[in-house]
Structures are given as structure tokens and as C-alpha cells.
Amino acid sequence: MRLAQKLAIITGGGSGFGAGIAAKFAAEGATVIVADINETAAQDVAMRIGGHWAGVDVAQNSSVAAMIAEAHATHGRIDIFVNNAGITHLPQPMEDVTEEEFDRVLAVNAKSVYLSARHLVPLMKAAGRGVILNVASTAGVSPRPRLNWYNASKGWMITATKAMAVELAPHGIRVNAINPVAGETPLLASFMGEDTPQMRAKFLATIPLGRFSTPEDMGNAACFLCSDEASMITGVAMEVDGGRCI
């Protein structure tokens, strides 16, 4: 029960790593709000873990503002916020990525962190406490070719994590990130371009422990960083990657 009496919001919580984090947080005693643009998926996960759900488009200011305001009004507090929602463009030469694809990747992966901070940080400052966790990627540390702008968006998230941590530490707010390697999530096929045994073998060959990240792996790492056990840890981008970045 490491997260007992905590209120946690997880964006992109309707599937993949977000669902794994939501399940772990609920098991550790947190009251969890599963937030996702796919409201049906968010509701399904929330019902499964005994939590709450909310629809949100993390790239839209009004949507993020409404979701955070409603959560705070209903529960009176927001202790943990996980910026997990993310997308990628398909593997291709950097010059072939369309402007629309680029804008969408940066809006969901980068602008979303800014928007959540804009509406969340004042509430956490007033409370004198809070934890923000950004789900970045090994792509921001050791980029793969043909995923250039996705790589860049995750590198941005890692730098934003460190900058936020320095600025918010005097207010009792910790900010960390986790860097998963490719995992069994809806984005896996997009990262690989095609989901075939050959492409899976190619990706797995780059991971020393020889397997993909799982939602459970992300849940365990996220739970530690968001718990009071990690009260002295801020500005860290923890690689949960089976050794991929060594």
C-alpha cells in the first residue's frame, strides 16, 4: 500500500504502459483516474481496477484544463500525475515525415507535458507537494534511425523533466521520467513498421535481457518513483530497458 491515500491521474491509461501503471497504482492503494482520448478504453481499465475515468485530448488546452479542474474539484487533491500518453510516426526517412505527422507527434508527446504543467503545477504549489512522472523513451537517449522526430520528442521530454525538477523542487514537487524500450503495446507495430517475427527478432537483438518491456515493468518502476520511498529522487530519467542503452 505504498500509494495509500494518493490521488493519481494517468494519461493514456486506457491501454499499454498506461494501463499497467494504473493497475499497479490501484493495487498499491492509490485512487486512480484513468484518462484517455479513447473513453471506452479508459472506462474499461477503470472498472477493472476499481478506479475512475476521464476523457481527455492531451494535445488540447481546454480538454486538459477541464480534466484537471474536475479531478481536483471532485477529490480535493492531485498527488501524482503521469504524462504517459504518446504517439509515433511510422519508420521512414526524416524528410518524408509530413508536417501534419510532425505536429501531431510533438503535440501529444511534448506539448501535453506543458499543458498539464500549466494547469497542475499551481495546484501542487498550493498544496506544497506533488509528483509528476513523464513516460519518455530509450529513443530519447539512444535514437533508432527512421524514427527521427519521435526520438526528438522523447529527448525533449527528458530535458523537460530535468528542467521541471530543478524549478519545482523548492515547492516540494518531484519530477522524474521513465525510459521504456519497445514493449507489447499498441505502438509496437508502429515502431517496427510491420509486426513480423523477423522485425521482432531485429528489435530484441538490441536488448541485452532479450525481451520487450511490459506494462507491469513500467508499473513497478513508476510506483517506486511516485512513492514516498523515492522522496530524495527528482530529475531522474530511469531506463527500464533491459540494458538497451548500455
Image (cartoon, rainbow, N blue to C red):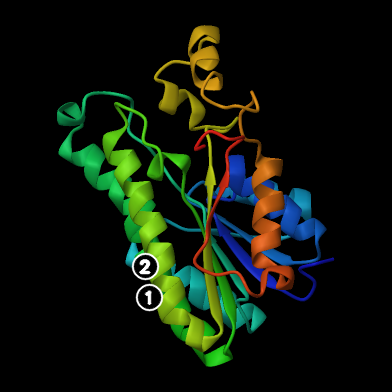
Question: Is residue 188 visible in this depiction of the protein?
Answer: yes
> Which amino acid type is shown beneath numbered disc 1?
Arg
**Cα distance in 3D space between marks 2 and 1:** 5 Å
Residue 22 in the figure: left or right of residue 111: right
Q: Nearer the viewer, residue 15 or 164?
A: 164
Where 108 sits versus 53, above or below?
above
The disc label shown at residue 86, or none:
none
SS at badge 2? helix
> Residue 7: x percent and y percent?
67, 72
Q: How many marks?
A: 2
Residue receiving disc 1: 118
> For the residue carrying disc 2, how many other residues have a C-alpha within 10 Å: few (<14), some (14-19), or many (20+)?
some
Instruction: Single out the residue that lies furthest toward the front.
Output: 246
At x 48%, y 50%, the residue is 85
Are circles 2 and 1 on residues that touch, CB within 8 Å? yes
> Residue 32: x percent and y percent?
69, 63
